[in-house]
C-alpha cells in the first residue's frame, strides 16, 4: 500500500510541476514564425535576426480602416520612442486589403517611426495563423517565443510592463 501511495504522490507532484511550468513559463510555448519581409523603405527585416540580437519584437497587424488601430497608434508611437533605444522593435503589418497608398498616407500623417510592412499577398498573416482581424498583436520575446497574443486593442500599461521585464532581464546569450 505504501509503495502505491508513494507512486501516486510522486505522479501528482510531477503533474503539478509540469502544469506549473507550462503556465508560468516565461519563454512561452509557441515559436514565432521564421519569416523575413521588406518594409516600405525596402529594408529587409528578419524575425530571426532580431532574436539573435536579443530584441523583443511587437508585431501588430493593422488597417487604415480600423478604428481601434488608429486609436492605439499614438500609444505605440510613444512606446517605440521610449523603448526602441533600449532594444524593442515594433513592426506594423498593413493588411492585404488595405490599399498601399492609404497605408503610406497614414504613415506620413501619423509620423509612424517604426517599420511598416505591406502584406500584399497575406503571407505574413498566414505565417502568424491566418490573421483576419485588426488590430492583432504578437509580442515575441528575445528567444523567439510568442509570449502574448491579443486580438483587439492592447492594454498599453500591461504590454509595456512585459516589454520592460524583457529589456531588463539579463542577457541569455
Image: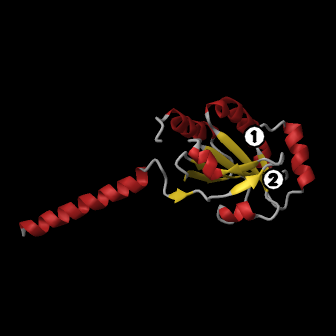
| Residue 171 versus residue 147 in the image, above or below | above
Q: Which residue is mark 1?
A: 114
The disc label shown at residue 63, or none: 2
Residue at 71% x, 49% y is 45
Residue 8 vs residue 33: left or right? Answer: left
Image quadrant in which the N terminus is located = bottom left
Residue 110 image-quadrant placement: top right
What's the CA distance linking mark 2 and mark 1? 15 Å
Asked if residue 24 lies left or right of residue 15, the reply is: right
Q: Please indicate, yes or no, whether residue 167 appears anywhere in the rendered image.
A: yes
The answer to whether mark 2 and mark 1 are in CB contact below 8 A is no
Residue 10 location, x and y as percent?
20, 61
Left or right, residue 108 beside residue 31 = right
Please name the residue shown 63% across and 38% down the image: 88
Front disc: 2 or 1: 1
Q: For the point 24% across and 62% down, which residue is it? A: 12
Give the percent coordinates (x, y) of residue 56.
Answer: 59, 43
Q: Callout 1: 10 Å neighbours few (<14), some, many (20+)? A: some
Could you tell which of marks 2 and 1 lies nearer the N-terminus? Answer: 2
Q: Give the x, y percent position of residue 48.
A: 61, 52
Q: Which residue occupies the foreground of this view, 121 or 8?
A: 121
Which secondary structure, mark 2?
loop
Badge count: 2
In the rendered structure, the answer to whether residue 157 lies left or right of residue 78 reads left
Which element is circle 1 on?
Answer: loop
Amino acid at each position: 500500500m505504501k509503495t502505491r501511495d508513494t507512486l501516486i504522490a510522486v505522479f501528482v507532484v510531477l503533474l503539478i510541476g509540469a502544469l506549473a511550468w507550462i503556465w508560468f513559463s516565461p519563454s512561452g510555448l509557441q515559436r514565432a514564425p521564421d519569416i523575413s519581409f521588406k518594409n516600405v523603405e525596402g529594408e529587409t527585416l528578419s524575425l530571426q535576426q532580431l532574436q539573435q540580437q536579443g530584441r523583443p519584437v511587437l508585431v501588430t497587424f493593422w488597417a487604415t480602416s480600423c478604428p481601434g488601430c488608429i486609436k492605439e497608434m499614438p500609444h505605440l508611437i510613444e512606446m517605440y520612442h521610449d523603448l526602441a533605444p533600449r532594444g524593442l522593435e515594433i513592426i506594423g503589418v498593413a493588411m492585404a486589403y488595405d490599399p498601399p497608398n492609404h497605408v503610406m498616407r497614414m504613415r506620413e500623417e501619423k509620423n509612424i517611426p517604426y517599420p511598416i510592412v505591406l502584406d500584399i499577398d497575406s503571407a505574413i498573416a498566414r505565417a502568424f495563423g491566418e490573421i483576419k482581424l485588426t488590430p492583432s498583436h504578437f509580442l515575441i520575446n528575445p528567444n523567439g517565443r510568442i509570449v502574448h497574443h491579443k486580438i483587439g486593442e492592447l492594454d498599453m500599461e500591461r504590454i509595456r510592463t512585459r516589454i520592460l521585464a524583457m529589456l531588463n532581464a539579463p542577457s541569455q546569450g
